[in-house]
């Protein structure tokens, strides 16, 4: 029988969706029965009390969690988020209910053995409740007590070769798409770059010294499966410089119906015969495709890598061979100024290990600038907005590029700096007076 | 700046401000040290290692403080 009456939570279960309340109840029951004989290191009824405090929060219309704390593992300023309940007598099981962030493997590739091991650690030393995965991408362990933090950390690092992720004003756990491991669209090895930067920037990941959070995300192609363009301060998106490769025979096979469009996706209903004009050519945002008789033509100079044609006809169209990535900066969710998408700051850069150029010419200058001039709790995107793209370009030491411009400016005034003007601001007054009277 | 001198400066300044404030942003510490962020970070890391400073985190933001200062009740004006 449930420890606490939870009528409002019970009502949530009646909706059409899978319910977290049902999952929590199942977990509470599992812990109570303990058929596996687990040597629980935190209260057995932690999940019952979690349900209880949530019910109380619904009843009161306010939270009963206290925010933040000094908990952590020694030497790390991130990876653990302190949570305390403000009703510890009523709900002793969740008096401490700290979150631990565990760095997810690149591309989120797991073995079942690995998943069993992390679940075993967490069943014994925590609530057994996980979030697979948090918004940043980490494996989230929800709910343990302070004494268990070092124990969990020891087991993760010593027995599983597994580190904690980032939280607070740190570099957050970098996240990537499955990349070249499974996907033929990937223009660079996302997992290699993600892992390399994770290792290189361990200090930034674990010891907070930034004005606020900072996120790297890696997408192998502009399909942006991890949505780096919207979710990361520095977004690395694979692209190519040369032409989309066309297999004209395969184009005809799509037209003739021998190959299913979209690799067979969306095939749950009859959409009629494949129409290359309507489904591909007319959908091209830059109108850079056309049929010349039976030949598909692409004006590659106009292509903005929207990926639509490649997604629809993957056997006929393939990414180019001169591959690398674009870097965008400043995406963020709302808090100040509303949500922002990333701004293109590096149109193309090669992505070959050891990635020295990416580190020394992009990441580190950006960090130095933001660390020095960013206000407390100011995201990179907000600093970029405050000081302007011109300043970003200066910091990176690159030339302005039309591809960095999203739309023409509304403000017609242009402010030139002396060094940007040929001959500077000094003039020969005698030469000037030859043509202009006083 | 020598490490011992830096340590003293941080402890003095944080103690002085301790009556009104117990948690400090990294930038506040860099200002006290009058150092560039990267140089300040090396000192601050060592101060944490020696437990002169401790981390505080809300989950989204990190701050630093002298150990034992800044109880929750204090910030809520109850003591």
Image (tube, grey):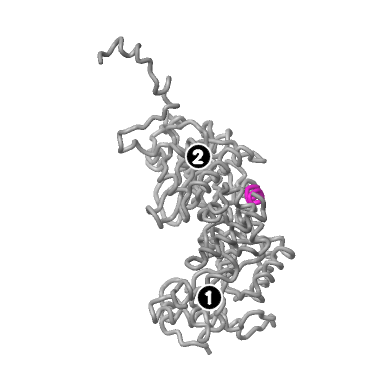
The residue lying at 52 percent from left, 52 percent from top is A226
For the magenta stretch, what is the residue range? A195-201
- Callout 2: helix, strand or loop? helix
What residue did someone put label 1 on?
Answer: A84
Looking at marks 1 and 2 on the same chain, the residue that comes earlier in the sequence is marked by 1
**Visible in this render: residue A392?**
yes
| Principal secondary structure, stretch drawn in magenta | helix
Query: Which of the 4 quarters of the picture holds residue A166?
Result: bottom right
Residue sitting nearer the eye, A248 or A178 = A178
Chain label for disc 2: A
Direction bottom: furthest residue: A1
Is A262 colored magenta in this rendering?
Answer: no
When the figure is inspected, residue A232 is found, relative to residue A99, above or below; the finding is above
Is A197 colored magenta in this rendering?
Answer: yes
Q: Are marks 1 and 2 on the same chain?
A: yes
- State the image coordinates of residue A75 (x, y, percent, origin top left): 66, 61
């Amino acid at each position: 029988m449930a420890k606490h009456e939870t009528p409002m939570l019970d009502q949530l279960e009646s909706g059409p969706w899978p319910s977290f309340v049902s999952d929590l109840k199942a977990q509470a029951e599992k812990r109570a029965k303990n058929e596996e004989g687990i040597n629980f290191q935190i209260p057995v009824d932690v999940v019952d009390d979690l349900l209880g405090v949530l019910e109380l929060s619904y009843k009161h219309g306010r939270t009963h969690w206290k925010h933040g704390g000094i908990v952590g593992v020694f030497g790390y300023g991130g990876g653990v988020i302190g949570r305390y309940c403000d009703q510890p007598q009523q709900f002793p099981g969740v008096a401490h209910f700290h979150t631990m962030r565990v760095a997810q493997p690149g591309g989120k590739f797991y073995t079942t053995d690995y998943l069993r091991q992390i679940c075993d650690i967490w069943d014994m030393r925590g609530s057994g409740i996980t979030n697979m995965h948090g918004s940043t991408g980490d494996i989230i362990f929800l709910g343990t007590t302070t004494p268990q933090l070092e124990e969990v950390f020891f087991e993760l690092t010593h027995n599983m070769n597994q580190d904690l992720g980032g939280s607070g004003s740190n570099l957050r756990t970098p996240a990537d798409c499955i990349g070249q491991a499974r996907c033929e669209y990937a223009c660079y090895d996302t997992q290699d770059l993600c892992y390399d930067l994770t290792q290189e920037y361990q200090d930034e990941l674990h010891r907070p010294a930034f004005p606020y959070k900072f996120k790297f995300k890696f997408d192998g192609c502009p399909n942006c499966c991890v949505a780096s363009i919207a979710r990361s301060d520095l977004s690395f998106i694979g692209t190519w410089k040369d032409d989309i490769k066309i297999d004209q025979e395969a184009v005809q096979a799509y037209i003739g119906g021998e190959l299913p469009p979209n690799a067979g996706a969306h095939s749950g209903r009859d959409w009629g015969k494949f129409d290359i004009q309507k489904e591909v050519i007319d959908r091209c945002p830059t109108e850079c495709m056309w049929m010349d008789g039976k030949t598909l033509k692409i004006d590659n100079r106009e292509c903005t890598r929207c990926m639509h044609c490649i997604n629809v006809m993957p056997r006929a169209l393939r990414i180019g061979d001169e591959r690398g990535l674009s870097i965008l900066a400043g995406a963020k969710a709302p808090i100040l100024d509303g949500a922002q998408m990333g701004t293109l700051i590096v149109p193309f850069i090669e992505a070959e290990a050891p990635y020295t150029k990416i580190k020394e010419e992009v990441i580190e200058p950006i960090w130095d600038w933001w660390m020095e001039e960013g206000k407390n709790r100011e995201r990179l995107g907000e600093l970029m907005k405050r000081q302007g793209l011109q300043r970003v370009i200066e910091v990176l030491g690159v030339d302005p590029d039309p591809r960095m411009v999203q739309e023409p400016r509304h403000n017609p005034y242009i402010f030139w700096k002396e060094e940007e003007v040929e001959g500077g601001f000094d003039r020969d007054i005698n030469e000037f007076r030859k043509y202009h009277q006083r | 700046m020598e490490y011992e001198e830096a340590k003293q400066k941080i402890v003095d300044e944080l103690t002085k401000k301790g009556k009104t404030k117990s948690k400090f942003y990294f930038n506040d510490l860099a200002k006290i040290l009058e150092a560039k962020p990267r140089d300040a970070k090396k000192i601050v890391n060592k101060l944490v290692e020696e437990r002169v400073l401790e981390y505080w985190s809300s989950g989204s933001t990190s701050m630093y403080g002298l150990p034992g200062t800044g109880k929750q009740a204090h910030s809520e004006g109850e003591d």
